Image (cartoon, rainbow, N blue to C red):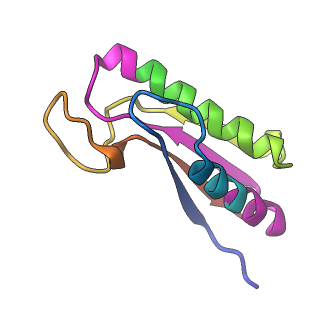
Amino acid sequence: MAYEAREFVVYFPFDQSVLTPEAQAVVSQAAQYAKDGSATRITVVGHTDTSGSPKYNARLSERRAKAVADGLVGMGVNATALAVDWKGESAPAVSTGDGVKEPLNRRSTISINF
């Protein structure tokens, strides 16, 4: 199998940064893919919806990114290949007005490169 760059998306419940069973499953798939293909670079980026203040959302997106990164490392992904970033509400998957609870924006992305 040829491994190529791939992105996984982990979704979070409103105002939470804990991995749900569904989120755990995605993190597990990403970890397996990264390990099987000997990924050289894995970037995790946390995001939020526009509900809440920008400052609060920056911290929440950081917690989400770190929860995913910790999950990956816990599943055997090499921490030295991991970069963690967070965007708060500044890079939504779905554009909304301020104060909108949009489930698709409550996420962390896992970008895997080889």
Work out which quarter of the rendered image holds the C terminus and state it.
bottom right
State the residue at coordinates (26%, 31%): 50
Residue 69 spot, x, y in % from top left: 68, 38
* In the rendered image, the vertical position of residue 71 relative to residue 98, given as above or below: below
Magenta run includes residue 50: yes
Quadrant position of residue 7? bottom right
Q: Is residue 61 left or right of residue 78?
A: left
Residue 36: x and y, percent? 82, 68
Residue 2 on image: x %, y %? 73, 82
Please tell me which residue is depicted at 67% across the width and 50% down the height of the picture.
42
| Nearest the eye: 39 or 104 | 104
Residue at the outermost front position = 21
Where residue 19 sits, quadrant-wise, is top right
Farthest residue in the bottom direction? Answer: 1
Q: Position of residue 52 (x, y in %)?
A: 28, 20
Q: Could you tell whether 52 is left or right of 58 in the image?
A: left
Name of the residue lying farthest toward the left? 97
Residue in view at x 52 percent, y 40 percent: 45
What is the number of callouts on the image?
A: 0
Q: Is residue 83 magenta?
A: no
Q: 63 and 113: which one is in front?
A: 63
* In the displayed structure image, the side of residue 93 where residue 81 appears, left or right: right
- The boundaries of the magenta stretch are 30-57
Q: Quadrant of the N terminus?
A: bottom right
Give the residue at x 53% y 30%: 17
